[in-house]
Image (cartoon, helix red, strand yellow):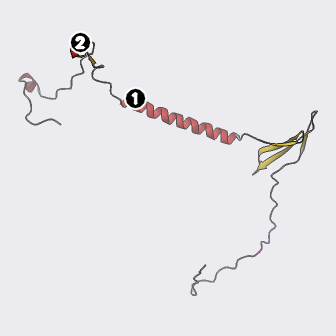
Amino acid sequence: MTAIFNPTGPAPAPVPTRSLLPTPAPAAPIGPVLDLPGTPAAALVPVTHAGRPVGAFVVAGGRVRYRRLADPDRLVAAAAGAFAVAALVTAVGVVAAARRRPPAIRTVTMGPGGWVSLRGAPLPPLRPDRRPWWARALRARRLVVDR
């Protein structure tokens, strides 16, 4: 590693080699052994992380098994996340359904002899006519294409 020192700058502060304050001992992650009552002798050893119980070792019948505890905070966070995703999917579905236009006519089928049948289909709604009354009366059309 290469270091560049600035000889005109302030002197660096000395690095302490050892703290003068005593460091607290870390909390033991494994709690005391609890003897459980019952016919087969059993013992329970709780396990904590950051002061919260995360599980326990169960010693029974010559076997040691670890049983994890459900964390209520993670459970609530997972439920809230699932609810948020479900609400988002529902909202997108509702918006997509609202934007979809219904067809102007019903299903087009082939009639007898190859004719196109639109039987029972209502007429599509008319587009609003924005011409003045005199243009409608004279059936006048614009020379420029409307866009």
| Image quadrant assignment for residue 68 | top right
> In the rendered view, would you say 112 is above or below 105?
above
77 in the magenta segment: no
Give the residues drawn in magenta, as a range. 13-25
Residue 99 visible, this angle = yes
> Which residue is drawn at the image coordinates 15% and 35% (left, top)?
146
**Residue 55: x %, y % from top left:** 78, 44
Q: Is residue 5 above or below residue 19?
A: below
**Mark 2: amino acid:** Pro
- Separation of marks 2 and 1 at Cα, in angstroms: 35 Å
Question: What residue sits 81% from the left and 43% below the top?
Answer: 56
Splitting the image into 4 quarters, where does residue 10 fall? bottom right
User: Disc 2 designates what residue?
Assistant: 112
**Label 1 Cα neighbours within 10 Å, binned few <14 / some 14-19 / many ≥20:** few
Query: Label 1 amino acid?
Result: Ala
Image point 61% across, 78% down: which residue? Answer: 1
Crowding at dot 2, Cα within 10 Å, few <14 / some 14-19 / many 20+, comes out as few
Q: Tell me which residue sits at (78%, 48%) in the image.
A: 48
